[in-house]
Image (cartoon, rainbow, N blue to C red):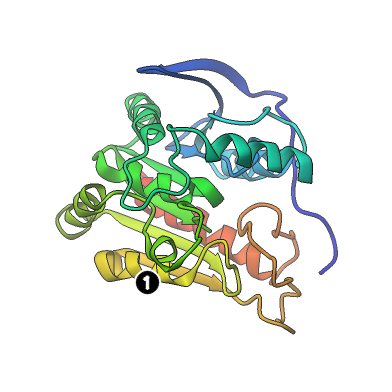
Amino acid sequence: MTGTAPTATLEGWARTPFSAGELVFDCFEKGSGPGVVLIPELPGITPEVLGLAEHLVDEGFTVVVPSPFGTPGKPQTPGYTLRAVARICVSAEFRAFAVNAHRPITVALRAVAAELAARTPGTGVGVIGMCFTGGFALAAAVDSTVLASVVSQPAAPFPLGRARQRDPGLSREELDRVAERASGEGFCALGLRFSDDANSPRPRFDALKARLGDAFEVIELDSSPGNPGGFSRRAHSVLTSEVREVPGHPALAARQRTVEFLRTRLSPS
């Protein structure tokens, strides 16, 4: 696979501190139109995450990117990522290894979504989570202000052992509420992963599909040996580092479907 992933900088993004209980972090905002909360993947708001954020802005959304970890705008390196993972592993806010877990950070992210929903067009917002934060997008949908969740390569809890591989990334009570909304309120979610991604295991998607049924659309990109997209078996970040802006590229098509999904769910009637 040739080329590089789309990137961007923090230029033009408005930075505002956000407080929810004891948690305080900065949020970055840009754009106009329906609201989307883009929760960064590990190690934080990298240039690739900002590349996705800018694309969403260009597609007509008001985008808010919370920064609960990492250094905004800092490029990803192996050392930087390891330090971010080490912090996550010991943080009670994230509960990196817990199964059937309510994660305190998701309460703050719901507050971010509710605040954005109150001042953007339509009746609610979308939330995108990626990598370790993938399941956070679904946990945020406990609240009715979240109309659509994008669950991209969810990696929490870290999938060590079969129980964690099957864990959907949110508590049983939270998933019950999301399933209730899917059956009674028309809530929908989109899930994305690479076929050979051990960090975002298929049993996790199977568990979500079993509870949400047709309300959970799954896109699985082929990363097996010799796959036509040229992805390595270590391919992980569907919407950021694996995207190439080349017509017909599978990750680009997944990004296009994500935009279409959000536009359909969030556009004011």
Q: In this view, does 121 lie above or below 22?
A: below
Instruction: Single out the residue that lies furthest toward the left.
Output: 184
| Left or right of residue 78, residue 20 in this image | left
Of 203 and 98, the residue lying toward us: 98
Coordinates of residue 81 in the picture (x, y in percent): 70, 42
Quarter of the image for residue 199 reads bottom right
Q: Is residue 160 above or below residue 124?
A: below
What is the number of callouts on the image?
1
Residue drawn at (20%, 54%), measured in percent from left and top? 176
Q: Quadrant of the N terminus?
A: bottom right
Instruction: Single out the residue that lies furthest toward the right.
Output: 2
Coordinates of residue 103 in the picture (x, y in percent): 37, 39
Residue 269 visible, this orientation: no
> In the structure shown, which secondary structural element does the residue marked by tag 1 occupy?
helix
Q: Name the residue under label 1.
A: 206
Instruction: Single out the residue that lies furthest toward the bottom.
Output: 226
Quarter of the image for residue 71 reads top right
Of 197 and 66, the residue lying toward us: 197
Residue 262 visible, this orientation: yes
Amino acid type, callout 1: Asp
Residue drawn at (34%, 41%), measured in percent from left and top? 140
Of 237 and 91, the residue lying toward us: 91
Coordinates of residue 110 in the picture (x, y in percent): 34, 33
Coordinates of residue 255 in the picture (x, y in percent): 58, 58
Residue drawn at (33%, 46%), measured in percent from left and top? 101
Callout 1: 10 Å neighbours few (<14), some, many (20+)? some
Residue drawn at (46%, 35%), measured in percent from left and top? 33
